[in-house]
Image (tube, rainbow, N blue to C red):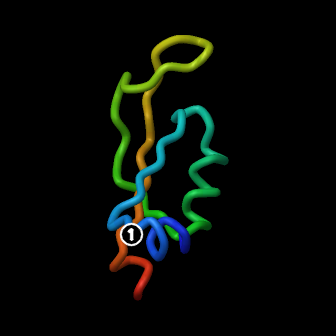
Amino acid sequence: MDYLFDVAGMNRVVATHDVNNPKSGRVMDKAGMKYEGTLRQAGLNMQGICDSVYHSMIRSDREK
């Protein structure tokens, strides 16, 4: 996150994971990202179409 905000100059970082892989979401939470929502049938995995969970962090979240 430091690189993305400080060096690359990003204002917003977004990551997604398959709804059937909640451990990935926990990693995003630990990185300081916040849950934004779940998009139904928005992703694709080895089993086919799946729901995608979105997490994000914006620069002001990090500064708090």
Instruction: Judge left or right: residue 10 versus residue 50.
Output: left
Query: Residue 54 versus residue 59: which sits nearer the camera?
Result: 59
Q: Quadrant of the N terminus?
A: bottom right
Q: Quadrant of the C terminus?
A: bottom left
Task: Report helix, strand or loop for mark 1.
Answer: loop
Disc 1 crowd rating (10 Å Cα; few below 14, some 14-19, many 20+) is few
- Against 57, residue 51 (above or below) is above
Residue 38 image offset from top left, x and y in percent = 37, 40
Query: Residue 20 versus residue 63: which sits nearer the camera?
Result: 63
Which residue is at a point 33% across and 67% down the rendered structure image?
Answer: 11
Instruction: Judge left or right: residue 43 versus residue 26.
Output: left
- Against 1, residue 52 (above or below) is above
Residue 28: quadrant of the picture: bottom right
Q: Looking at the picture, which amino acid does disc 1 mark?
A: Gly
Instruction: Judge left or right: residue 14 versus residue 17.
Output: left
Residue 43 image offset from top left, x and y in percent = 44, 25
Query: Residue 63 versus residue 52: which sits nearer the camera?
Result: 63
Mark 1 lies on residue: 9
Instruction: Judge left or right: residue 60 versus residue 17.
Output: left
- Against 4, residue 16 (above or below) is above
Residue 9 image offset from top left, x and y in percent = 38, 69
Which residue is at a point 49% across and 20% down the rendered structure image?
Answer: 44
Which residue is at a point 37% across and 22% down the rendered structure image?
Answer: 41
- Against 15, residue 61 (above or below) is below
- Considering every residue shown, the one lying at the far bottom of the view is 64
Q: How many marks?
A: 1
Residue 46 image offset from top left, x and y in percent = 62, 14
- Considering every residue shown, the one lying at the far front of the view is 7
